[in-house]
Amino acid sequence: MELAFINLGTWEIVGIVAVGILLFGSRLPNIARSLGKSVTEFKKGVKDIQDDMSGRSEPKKLDDKREVEAEKVEKTESKEAEKVSS
């Protein structure tokens, strides 16, 4: 295998991999997990763009979390206002 101007044989590649595992061994599962999530998100983004360009996708709905949180805040504010007025 040629890498730029360096000719690497099988044993050289095995040595480089072994050194990499020794140096980054404890972090490799986290790196692989985050890489997998990144690839998945990238594929979703590409698919969404393709769907948007072809006109097949429906508009995405916003989460109702904002409304629920706003209702909680309003209830909390009204309770506080009642305490202050009484």
Image (cartoon, rainbow, N blue to C red):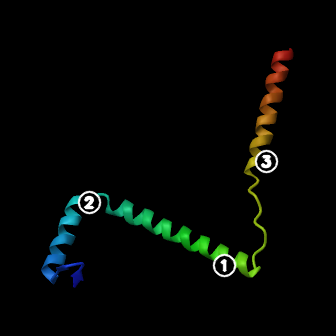
Q: Depth-wise, is mark 2 or mark 3 nearer the camera? A: 2
Q: Secondary structure at mark 1?
A: helix
Query: Badge 1 local density, few (<14 within 10 Å), some, or many (20+)?
Result: few
Q: Position of residue 15 (x, y in %)?
A: 15, 72
In this figure, which residue is indicated by the disc labeled 1? 50
Residue depicted at 78% across the width and 68% down the height: 59
Residue depicted at 38% across the width and 60% down the height: 30
Q: Position of residue 73 (x, y in %)?
A: 76, 36
Q: Name which of mark 2 and mark 3 comes first in the sequence.
A: 2
Q: Secondary structure at mark 3?
A: helix
Residue 75 figure quarter: top right
Q: Depth-wise, is mark 3 or mark 1 nearer the camera? A: 1
Task: Confirm or deny contact between disc 2 and disc 3 (CB under 8 A).
Answer: no
Q: Position of residue 76 (x, y in %)?
A: 77, 31
- Image mark for residue 67: 3
- Image mark for residue 16: none
Query: Badge 3 local density, few (<14 within 10 Å), some, or many (20+)?
Result: few
Q: CA distance from mark 2 to mark 1?
A: 37 Å
In this figure, which residue is indicated by the disc labeled 2? 24
Residue 17 sits above or below residue 80 on the image: below
The quadrant of the rendering that contains the C terminus is top right
The residue type indicated by label 2 comes to: Phe
The residue type indicated by label 1 comes to: Gln
* Left or right of 72 on screen, residue 36: left
